[in-house]
């Protein structure tokens, strides 16, 4: 597969739970911790609100990477939501792999409301990973 | 068609210095459904808000997007603005172009490009926003306090004094808790019982407090303002109406077992009052040890009772009561010393826990307040106090500091010197921690005025030699081994969460930390609330603390309860799950994932052709639902959707992000 990597700017959709990861992103902002602008956050109340179909839809619409970020296991604002996230999305990850999507394109991370620096770091690393992989061509809707 | 208005905030230069506001507005005007776009230097200012209100009215805007700071900052502010203009407050969406954009993307024009994308995403969602109305919840004007130690007593008294009914539930036969067991209190050396018992009596006599001792809360259902608790009042075997508390019954009871109140330092009977100042001051029959219950004969107490109050046939009483708020004040336990064989506890009678020492010093204790060695009844000349037994020990104890031991050990050293003139207190410590008003001064008195010797270092072994005990340890300041001959060893044992704390937490729907202490909603800013609305914490059950802290927290919890009960009704969270009954297959997968037990099955009857069918569907209790959305994802037919974060809204956002 030949992929033009020069000048490629990946689009990354980040589903962030309102209580931890969205707040972590806010903290990265308050602390002026830069990360690539390729990341676009969609706010959800809890990472367990993320239906696997949302992730697939993002890939279909042309996202090059998707990340779901929630509270650390055990710290969920809703007691146990992120345990469901973990189970559902690990199944999804295997499905995506089966469909030929590189597993690095879809990640699940735990970022608390006090981890602004971690948020910036995770997004920076993720963008670099996706940039190296090149555009998502597999699941993209035929244009 | 939805008419979306976009309002872009400069936030002074916070946004405008990085993001080209003009371009964002120009791009917004071309987005689907957008009929109006404008900017303001400070949207949150009174002028900015007024401009939003005016534009909504003038341009007939029906959905509002504000591109500004994080919604976690000003979502509520702008919801009020939107509502003031006559729209449903949930018609608002916020594009976070400050924290998520201008503050982190300062390079070139990426900030502007991303801001436009964020606005497009918010517009896509806003166009699909439906009006939401918070439900109104009734409040039961009655509070439940679980645990009647000093924290529970204080919370109950404060709530009751504010005019609300309180049920105070205590699992032991008397209220008073751990504080009742203590002798003196630091740093004033007030007698613990002398300051506690008046409060205990106040509880017993208060018109607004109903006391349930020897009772446990077995079940709690419901949600803030509308809890239902099941309380089991265990049978005391005593008719409380008839009993006069004369005490004749227990004098002739043939059974003697270790007294829990005396920390095993004295015996009690099978029918007993735990301590002389107990409230209620009426006995209880301990069925596990009573000869009548274990062997079927005896009945001595019944024969002796002049009031005819002893009734072995009395059964447990189970009450179901409704409450608006709950205070959890279940207290603490003391670490089991099984893992600490090196200190010889349990092997040598003169090795005591500090709670046992507390009883030994107490005037109403087993020795009448004389400090005597349990082995030979002689006063000790040298007493070693070992700190941090189980505390600050990641290897086999608890990682945390128990907080009260440094201070009560200084107190014990002082009391030892006062009660046994010439006795030598020697304290082994890791650090001496005395934060608190007059605490450091109190510790200084123990060393300077009372001559307590402090050795920095830990003890490796305690073993008997003759009738004395040898302590082997190390002085870490001089890096030399220490060997001492003492007459008594007192262990400052770590405080722990109650053994049943995790179970109590599950029953109440509140979480515990790694050490089973209950979690507060925020460690700094919401220290008495839990993540479950309407449930509050007081005292040691939330973490180690001393009496003044427990009392302060209890009063704080009481204020929260009173503030809640004062309201006529509660405004519910409108972003709750919703089930479309026509699509629901009744699989009830959603009930399995709900952390709040907010979804129940329900039967509905519907007509299909000429037939009338009854089938099962899921129903969301909007009072219980907190709006996480886990159930919406679990729903196979897609009948369950989360208001405010519907599948359609989120998919529209995803589509807009990827444009």
Image (cartoon, helix red, strand yellow):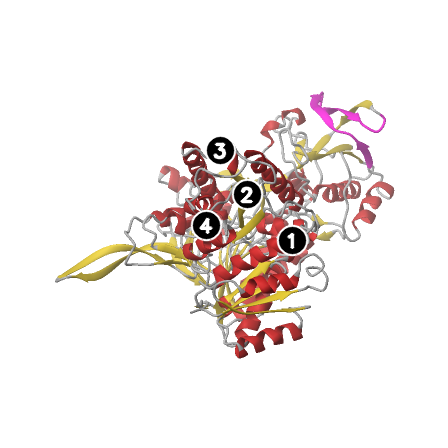
Tag of residue B111? 1
Q: Please tell me whether residue B237 is drawn above or below residue A7 in the rendered image.
A: below
Q: For this rendering, which residue is in front, B310 or B403?
A: B403
Residues at marks 4 and 3, CA–CA distance in whole angstroms: 24 Å
Q: CA distance from mark 1 to mark 4?
A: 28 Å
Q: Position of residue B171 (x, y in %)?
A: 49, 50
Labelled disc at residue B498: 2
Same subunit: marks 2 and 1 = yes
Circle nearer the viewer, 2 or 3: 3
**Of B395 and B229, the residue lying toward us:** B395
Q: Chain of mark 3?
A: A
The quadrant in which residue B412 appears is top right
Q: Which residue is mark 4?
A: A49
- Secondary structure type for disc 4: helix
For the residues tagged 1 and 4, is the chain the same? no
Are dots 1 and 3 in contact, CB under 8 Å?
no
Q: Is residue B528 left or right of residue B636?
A: right
SS type, badge 3: loop
């Amino acid at each position: 597969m030949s992929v033009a990597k020069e000048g490629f700017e990946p689009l990354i959709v980040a589903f962030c739970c309102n209580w931890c990861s969205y707040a972590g992103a806010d903290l990265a902002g308050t602390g002026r911790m830069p990360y690539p602008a390729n990341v676009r956050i969609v706010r959800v109340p809890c990472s367990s609100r993320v239906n696997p179909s949302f992730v697939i839809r993002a890939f279909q619409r042309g996202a090059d990477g998707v990340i779901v970020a929630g509270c650390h296991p055990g710290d969920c604002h809703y007691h146990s939501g992120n345990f469901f996230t973990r189970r559902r999305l690990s199944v999804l990850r295997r499905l995506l792999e089966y469909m030929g999507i590189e597993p690095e394109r879809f990640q699940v991370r735990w970022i608390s409301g006090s981890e602004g620096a971690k948020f910036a770091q995770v997004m920076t690393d993720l963008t670099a990973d996706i940039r190296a992989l090149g555009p998502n061509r597999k699941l993209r809707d035929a244009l | 068609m939805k008419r979306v208005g976009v309002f872009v905030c400069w936030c002074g230069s916070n946004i405008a210095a990085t993001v080209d506001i003009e371009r964002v507005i120009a791009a917004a005007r071309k987005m689907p459904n957008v009929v109006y776009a404008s900017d303001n230097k400070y949207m949150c200012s009174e002028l900015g808000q007024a401009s939003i209100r005016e534009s909504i009215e003038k341009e007939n805007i029906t959905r509002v997007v504000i591109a500004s700071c994080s919604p976690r900052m000003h979502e509520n502010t702008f919801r009020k603005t939107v509502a003031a203009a006559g729209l449903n407050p949930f018609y608002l969406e916020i594009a976070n172009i400050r924290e998520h954009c201008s503050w982190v993307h300062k390079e070139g024009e990426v900030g502007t490009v991303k801001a436009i994308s964020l606005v497009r995403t918010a517009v896509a969602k806003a166009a699909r926003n439906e009006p939401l109305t918070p439900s109104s919840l009734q409040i039961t004007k009655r509070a439940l306090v679980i645990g009647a130690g000093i924290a529970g007593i204080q919370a109950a008294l404060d709530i009751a004094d504010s005019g609300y009914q309180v049920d105070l539930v205590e699992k032991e036969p008397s209220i008073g808790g751990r504080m009742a067991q203590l002798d003196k209190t630091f740093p004033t050396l007030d007698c613990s019982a002398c300051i506690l018992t008046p409060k205990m009596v106040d509880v017993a006599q208060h018109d607004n407090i109903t006391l349930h001792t020897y009772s446990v809360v077995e079940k709690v259902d419901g949600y803030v303002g509308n809890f239902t608790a099941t309380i089991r009042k265990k049978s005391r075997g005593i008719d409380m109406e008839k009993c006069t508390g004369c005490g004749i019954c227990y004098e002739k009871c043939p059974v003697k077992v270790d007294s829990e109140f005396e920390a095993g330092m004295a015996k009690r009977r099978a029918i007993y009052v735990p301590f002389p100042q107990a409230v209620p001051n009426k006995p209880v029959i301990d069925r596990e040890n009573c000869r009548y219950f274990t062997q079927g004969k005896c009945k001595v107490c019944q024969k002796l009772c002049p009031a005819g109050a002893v009734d072995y046939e009395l059964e447990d009483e189970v009450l179901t009561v409704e409450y608006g708020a709950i205070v959890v004040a279940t207290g603490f336990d003391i670490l089991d010393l099984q893992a600490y064989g090196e200190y010889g506890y349990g092997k040598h009678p003169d090795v005591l826990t500090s709670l046992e020492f507390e009883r030994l010093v107490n005037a109403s204790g087993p020795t009448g307040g004389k400090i005597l060695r349990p082995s030979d009844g002689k006063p000790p000349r040298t007493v070693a106090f070992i700190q941090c037994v189980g505390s600050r020990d990641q290897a086999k104890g608890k990682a945390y500091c128990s907080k009260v031991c440094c201070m009560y050990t200084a107190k014990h050293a002082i009391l030892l010197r006062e009660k046994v003139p010439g006795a030598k207190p020697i304290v082994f410590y890791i650090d001496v921690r005395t934060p608190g008003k007059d605490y450091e001064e109190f510790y200084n008195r123990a060393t300077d005025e009372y001559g307590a010797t402090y050795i920095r270092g830990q003890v490796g072994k305690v073993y008997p030699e003759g009738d004395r005990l040898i302590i082997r340890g190390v002085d870490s300041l001089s890096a030399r081994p220490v060997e001492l001959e003492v007459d008594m060893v007192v262990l400052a044992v770590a405080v722990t969460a109650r053994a049943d704390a995790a179970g109590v937490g599950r029953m109440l729907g509140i979480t515990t930390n790694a050490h089973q202490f209950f979690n507060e909603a925020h460690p700094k800013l919401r220290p008495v609330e839990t993540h479950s609305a309407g449930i509050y914490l007081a005292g040691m059950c939330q973490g180690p603390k001393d009496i003044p802290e427990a009392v302060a927290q209890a009063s704080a919890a009481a204020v929260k309860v009173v503030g809640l009960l004062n309201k006529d009704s509660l405004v519910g969270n409108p972003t709750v799950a919703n089930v479309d009954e026509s699509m629901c297959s009744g699989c009830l997968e959603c009930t399995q994932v709900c952390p709040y037990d907010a979804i129940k099955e329900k039967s509905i009857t519907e007509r299909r052709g000429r037939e009338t069918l009854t089938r099962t569907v899921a129903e969301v209790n909007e009072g219980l639902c907190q709006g996480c959305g886990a159930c919406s994802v679990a729903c196979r037919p897609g009948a369950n959707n989360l208001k405010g974060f519907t599948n359609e809204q989120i998919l529209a956002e995803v589509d807009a992000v990827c444009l």
